[in-house]
Amino acid sequence: MKADIGVIGLAVMGQNLILNMNDNGFKVVAYNRTVAKVDEFLNGPAKGTNIVGATSLEDLVSKLESPRKVMLMVRAGDVVDQFIDALAPLLDEGDIIIDGGNTNYPDTNRRYASLREKGIRFIGAGVSGGEEGARFGPSIMPGGDPEAWPFVKPIFQGIAAKTEQGEACCDWVGKEGAGHFVKMVHNGIEYGDMQLISEAYHFMKEGLGLSADEMQAIFTEWNKTELDSYLVEITADILGYKDEDGEALVEKILDTAGQKGTGKWTGINALEHGIPLTLITDSVFARCLSSLKDQRVEAEKVFNNPILAIEGDKAQWVDALRQALLASKIISYAQGFMLIREASEENDWSLNYGNVALMWRGGCIIRSAFLGNIRDAFEANPELAFLGLDNYFKDILEQCLPAWRKVVAKSFETGLPMPCMSSALTFLNGYTTARLPANMLQAQRDYFGAHTYERTDKPRGEFFHTNWTGKGGDISSTTYDV
Ligand code: NBP
């Protein structure tokens, strides 16, 4: 009997996905550049399963059912191109290549277009959930050639995480690089969630002087509220984890954050699309600032800018902080969906936003109860431009607003850096203000660069230029832009 799918790449993700596919009744052929790892896998974790190995790409291809499905779980970048180039001549028209790595979506667009010319169907699938997700149910976000989806669907939906209602956290996202685009925004949101939680921890530790054990109990309680999520859950676990000397291990970890680039891609993409994705972008900058450790250590010595203790009832502050965290998180997701919507319209991807929320509901790092409400919001109104205007989320934002303002104001008063909670509030303040001071900006642009402006007392689309000093001419600019 030939195999249902071939998987190339036997590192942590590939091995676990293969075992998951096997558990779900699919026959898999495994291959790896370093072929010795195939035998190690077959004689190790895959022992006693239906998984078979391949010693070469030719061997792999010969063992697959037609149309052949080959999934790459290798390092993103050139390695994917190398495998595609080597595989394409061995495949027949209608066969399918899937890239399951963390690929930047323009690369998926390019590969999709070039393979389509060769008659090979290409899928770029974002996979989230790390090692455990891959083994027991990841979130999978496939996009690319829609004709390939029916062949891959039973495997992907079979191995994906399921919601409490039994729905698979995997569905077709859209054509071209839409799957990898949605995965990129997922990772950006992950950056935002992690930074928000870290800010809440910082407020409790430095501002309120709470211990790791006290904070563990608070995050555990928060995980029973609307904040119920994987990241809040693991934060409680982390705070409870003791080093050999009995102290909380987290306090011994150096405060410089690493990053692999997906948050940065999301921020760059938002700038290119002109979407105010302020929270995620600030979370990337927060990691950049954290990495300037030596400079920060020097600056703290020179500047008299200590973090002041927060006075008042601690339990009340903790509850205000919970509300600030929840409200900021809503803004982060709202901004993320604004970016997804813009990309969908620009690329004609026709994305289903409710389905995107469903795919993130389980299996992935940002999984949370709250994504069920996001799905409901987009099901009720697929055209929803800003999640905060959905009744459920609007009510929460309005309820949380006084406490959120108090927390952000206190952070400024006491010198606690909270870039994401404050940027989320600033965004909401701007988004809900009908008249912003951009009239002054436009006047300045017209003053020095003759860029013209529209008037509040004239129809949109009519442009005016004023000779502000009496010295300039009446010619307006079309080329010089600031
Ligand atoms: P890695 O990203 O560490 O890649 C390891 C695989 O790439 C091995 O099969 C390795 O073969 C192969 N490879 C490398 Br590295 N260089 C190669 C080359 N020049 N030619 C051919 N093969 C090469 O594995 P991973 O952590 O399992 O991740 C796989 C993909 O999934 C990545 O795109 C990753 O970003 C993504 N992802 C990872 C996670 C996670 O939690 N780790 C989560 C979600 C998505 P070798 O054995 O011969 O060196």
Image (tube, grey):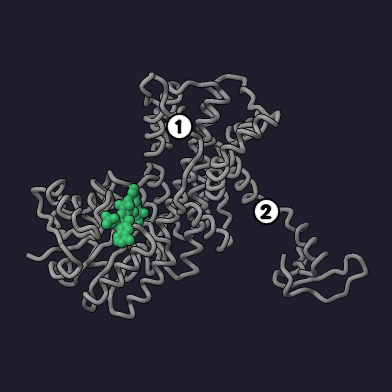
Cα gap from disc 2 to disc 1, whole angstroms: 45 Å
Mark 1 CB within 8 Å of ligand 1: no
Q: Position of residue 354 (x, y in %)?
A: 39, 55
Q: Residues within 10 Å of mark 1 (few under 14, many from 20)?
A: few
Pick the residue in front: 226 or 239: 239
Q: Is residue 464 above or below residue 20?
A: below
Image point (64%, 34%), residue name = 298
Q: Quadrant of residue 351?
A: bottom left
Helix, strand or loop for disc 2: loop
The quadrant the N terminus occupies is bottom left
Question: In this rendering, would 337 be left or right of 282?
Answer: left
Query: Three-letter amino acid code at disc 2?
Result: Ala
Q: Position of residue 376 (x, y in %)?
A: 40, 50
Q: Which residue is mark 1?
A: 253
Q: Which residue is mark 2?
A: 434
Image point (58%, 55%), residue name = 276
The disc placed on residue 232 is none
Pick the residue in front: 111 or 406: 111
Query: Three-letter amino acid code at disc 1?
Result: Ile
Question: In this rendering, would 57 be left or right of 229?
Answer: left
Pick the residue in front: 282 or 158: 282
Ligand 1 quarter of the rendering: bottom left
Q: How many marks?
A: 2
Question: In this rendering, would 452 be left or right of 395?
Answer: right
Choose mark 2 or mark 1, whichever is in front.
1
